[in-house]
Image: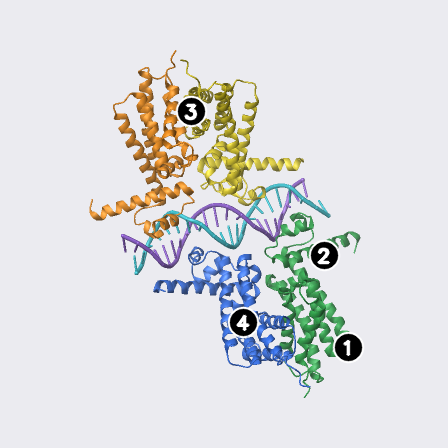
Chain colours: A blue, B green, C yellow, D orange, E purple, F cyan
Amino acid sequence: MSFREERAAERKMNIIKVAAKLFSEKGYHDATLEDIAKNLKYTKGSIYYYINSKQELLFQCHELAMDMLINRMEEIVAADWPLEVKLKEGIKAHIEMVVGEMSLVTVALGQEFELQEDYRQIIVARRDQYERYFRRLVDEGVEKGIFRPVPSKMAVFIIMGAVNWIPRWYSEKGSMSKEEIAEFFADYLVRPLLQTQA
Amino acid sequence: MSFREERAAERKMNIIKVAAKLFSEKGYHDATLEDIAKNLKYTKGSIYYYINSKQELLFQCHELAMDMLINRMEEIVAADWPLEVKLKEGIKAHIEMVVGEMSLVTVALGQEFELQEDYRQIIVARRDQYERYFRRLVDEGVEKGIFRPVPSKMAVFIIMGAVNWIPRWYSEKGSMSKEEIAEFFADYLVRPLLQTQA
Amino acid sequence: MSFREERAAERKMNIIKVAAKLFSEKGYHDATLEDIAKNLKYTKGSIYYYINSKQELLFQCHELAMDMLINRMEEIVAADWPLEVKLKEGIKAHIEMVVGEMSLVTVALGQEFELQEDYRQIIVARRDQYERYFRRLVDEGVEKGIFRPVPSKMAVFIIMGAVNWIPRWYSEKGSMSKEEIAEFFADYLVRPLLQTQA
Amino acid sequence: MSFREERAAERKMNIIKVAAKLFSEKGYHDATLEDIAKNLKYTKGSIYYYINSKQELLFQCHELAMDMLINRMEEIVAADWPLEVKLKEGIKAHIEMVVGEMSLVTVALGQEFELQEDYRQIIVARRDQYERYFRRLVDEGVEKGIFRPVPSKMAVFIIMGAVNWIPRWYSEKGSMSKEEIAEFFADYLVRPLLQTQA
DNA sequence: AATGAATGAGACTTCATTCAT
DNA sequence: AATGAATGAAGTCTCATTCAT
């Protein structure tokens, strides 16, 4: 990538991030291109030099968020850890992203709705891919007798719901740090899978 | 309430229900008053005889949903059951509503966002009231030594996240019935609160 | 049709006519909806109560023009006149419309281009139907030996070209009246079909 | 003209030709400078090194087309042929250009409309000059008794209309070759001028 | 000689809302 | 009680044009 291209890519990324911020703050519809432009100190028209439509902007937010989530999860799955640890780490990593890249991930998790059909299919497929990593960890645990036999799909739905709800209530000023929250969630959500010592 | 008023109230309720259906299907913005009117076999103008604004319609959806949730929860809290059972029943009741009155509750849970500030405050307060019932059950359980000591706020956030995520994936054609789902969720989410037998 | 509907239809017709006028004066692109609205003493938005898009407006101009042309031609074809007279009358009728309903027909003849594909197909089909009436007259004349044997398609193309070019130069202030023009055209264009007396 | 200037002129000509092609294919408005640039493997900005505005581009198309038509017609008028032959050759030459240099001439004949007023006056004047060659041929024929007495203006309008309509229907795949078409048109259009043998 | 980047004016369109009837 | 009609504000997007480099 040439210097020029690099700068352009960087600017596009910047636009996406700002868009994400506004989408997450005001919602997709209420964040106007005017808003986005103003935030970037661009004019409305200029943005269209980098993107094709507002929808594309939303789609890129989703893509970026899914990229981050999936990449991190692949590392975790590949790591040389016990299953239970992998699952907990997966949950913690997810929470870190939800909290760290708040706007991006918030958009991706909460505004799937606004995506037009063609884009949506792509994103749904990727989310499915992501969730499958979790399901597989659960299934393996069950096979190996580490976990109780549970329908992994449901278990993962519970996990996903719990963590994806975080942006709805999380505040930096809260009494628990994000690490504590992550730890608590990981424990709470994995615990029901474990065999109860008789 | 006079006969006239009664009829009007009834019709208004009807409008709200239809609005809820469309809001949940297409999202608040994409469901136009035209759509709503058409579904009711009214004209756009007529709706304004019963409501003041589209926002009000959304607000009423929230109110109605919160009414149902809170009323049911009050019954449960007042019942003469063990704490643990109350908590489980609370979760199951919530799930039943999410799944049964899907559109109304889906709107309330997923589109808080679109509410304008003044309405939102009211709703947030009511949701807080609702969640407090759950928190109190957890706290009592902890006090009585039935549950492990956990920050009840977090526990309830987990529970709420898990159950509120259901509309995102639930389908009537799924392999588990709603009762089975409710049962599984209640067990999975309460289990981590329990003291592990040493 | 109820009174209400009638009035609405009338208004829509009015919008189409004004649109036609502006389209023919400034071209489809340069006539903005703002222009059209201003001419009608409507606001931009109001127009959309009657139509769905600017394209539809253009399409309606085409439809209306074709309606008029075809209806008139059907009468002529059905009349009890010699072939040669029918052909001449067809030409004269066409010219009268081009000159009389100038804007409407001008748009239809000159701005087929701007129609989007789906609309265009419909219009092309109708124009074909219209031209076929002329071709058939020529063919019959040839069969009966009244006309020289000529490829009727070409002959009709010549006729159509000549008459459709009129809006490009016609002015009410010209030295010939429209009737004289029509007469001259009809004679000039039919004459080459006639058998030369040896 | 220096080498530099020559190259620039050449490139400008190239741009005009490509513009003509796109204007005739998509219409003036729908052919964007982006389109034109892409076809030339330039960037939008670069085109402005050679031209001043899109309008100028359109104007140049007109100029070029008129140049070609007028030059050819001057040759014909100057030739040592009978009047009738000159007229027929004029028609045939025009048709050849319409069909051969399709895009350029099509733009000039069909998109006079889009020209802004100042440019348009120039072009209208040149077209008038061109048509005057035809009118003069008709007038001379009338004077010499070769042609029937007809208003030459009208006759030429008919001729121009017929030939300028060709781009609207002509296809290379048609059953008649362009030479046959030209021959047929010339005969059909000149024939009504001739004295009928008594 | 060429281009990437930016601009700004303006176009079409949508829609909640109002109001006379 | 209901509705047809109209409005106006706002939003997305397009594109010719400019300019520093």
The answer to whether mark 4 and mark 3 are in CB contact below 8 A is no
Q: Which mark is residue C72?
A: none
Q: Which mark is residue C173?
A: 3
Q: Tell whether A113 sits left or right of A43.
A: right
Task: Report helix, strand or loop for mark 1.
Answer: loop
| Above or below: residue D17 compared with residue B3 | above
Q: Which mark is residue B81?
A: 1
- Cα distance between the residues tagged 4 and 3: 76 Å
Give percent across and percent down for residue A198: 69, 86
Query: What is the three-letter code of the residue carrying label 1?
Result: Trp
Please tell me how crowded label 3 is: few (under 14), some (14-19), or many (20+) other residues with Cα within 10 Å: few
The residue at 69%/53% (across/down) is B50
Quadrant containing the C terminus of chain C in the rendered view: top left
The chain carrying label 3 is: C
- Residue at image mark 4: A98
Whether discs 2 and 1 lie on one chain: the answer is yes
Please tell me whether mark 4 or mark 3 is closer to you in this view.
Answer: 4
Q: Which mark is residue B13?
A: 2
